[in-house]
Amino acid sequence: MQALKTIGVFVFLKKRKTQTLVGRLYKIDQKFIFSYEDSYFNARNSIALGPEFPLTQKEFSSDRLFPSLEDRIPSTQNPAYSEYCLAMGIDPKEQDLFILLSTVGSKGPSSFIFYPIFKRDINPKDIVEFRNMLGLTTREFAAVFEISQNSLNAIERGRIRGSEILKRLEILMHFPSVTLYFLLVNSGYLVHEKWVFATEKLKGMLQKITYEKNS
C-alpha cells in the first residue's frame, strides 16, 4: 500500500461492545472543520462531542483546534509526556495535532476516541487484496460490512471514486478493531470456518499494529 499522510481524524463513540462513527475533523484553508456523520446526527440519544459541538447543527469551523479537543492532548510540560508519546509509538517532539489526537489524545476517561484520516487514493487492488486476505467473496464482504455489493464490485473495478463507501473501506482496511466488530455482529452471514479464518487474520493485524506501536 502507499505511504499515508494524516490529514484529519475520524471520531468514534466507544461503548462496551460497539464503536459508532460520530464524525470527522479535518483542516481546510487553515481552518479546522468538524462535521457530524448524518447517521449519528440524526440518531436518537446521540451525545455531543463537546460544548462547541451542539447537536443543533452539523458542521463547525474554527481558526484553531477546538478547545475541548485541544484539552485531550496532554501538556508537553507534563513530566510523563515523553512516556505517553513513546508508549503510543510517536516522537515526543511530534507537533501534528491530528497525530497527537489519534494517539496520546485518545487516552483518558472520555468515551470519544480518534482514528487518523489518511490522504491517499484507495487503490482498487488494495481493496481486492484486503478482501481476499479475509477469505471473503464480494457478496460475503458486502453483507458483513454493510455495504452494497454492486458498489463494491464497481469500486474494485475502479469505477467509483470519492463515495461514502470508500470512507468506510478506508476505516476497515486500517483499523482491524473496527473490522472485527462488524465480523462479530454480522457473523451470521458467514459459515463458521470462514468467520474464524477472517477473525484470525484481523487479530494478527491488530497484534502487529500493537507490536509496532510498542517497539
Image: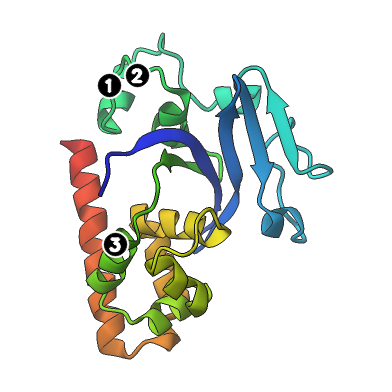
The residue to which callout 2 is attached is 94
Residue 200, by quadrant, is: bottom left
Residue that mark 3 sits on: 125
Q: Amino acid at mark 2?
A: Glu
**Residue 95: % across, % down:** 40, 17
- Neighbor class of circle 1 (other Cα within 10 Å; few <14, some 14-19, many 20+) is few
Whole-Å distance between the Cαs marked 2 and 3? 32 Å
Q: Given this view, does label 2 or label 3 mark the residue nearer the observer? A: 3
**Residue 140 visible in rendering:** yes
Q: Earlier in the sequence, mark 3 or mark 1?
A: 1
Mark 3 element type: helix
| Above or below: residue 47 compared with residue 126 | above
Identify which residue is drawn at 53% across, 53% down: 162
**On the picture, is 23 further left or further right than 186?**
right
**Mark 2 Cα within 10 Å, few/some/many (few <14, many 20+)?**
few
What's the residue type where badge 1 is placed?
Asp
Q: Amino acid at mark 3?
A: Lys
Up-down relation of residue 21 to residue 59 (above or below) = below
Q: Residue at the far bottom: name it.
A: 191
Residue placed furthest toward the right: 56
Q: Is residue 127 above or below residue 189?
A: above
Q: In the rendered view, does 118 fall on the left or right side of 210?
A: right
**Disc sitting over residue 91 in the figure:** 1
Disc number lying in front (3 or 1):
3
Residue at 29% across, 65% down: 130
Q: Position of residue 27 (x, y in %)?
A: 57, 28
Colour treatment of the image: rainbow
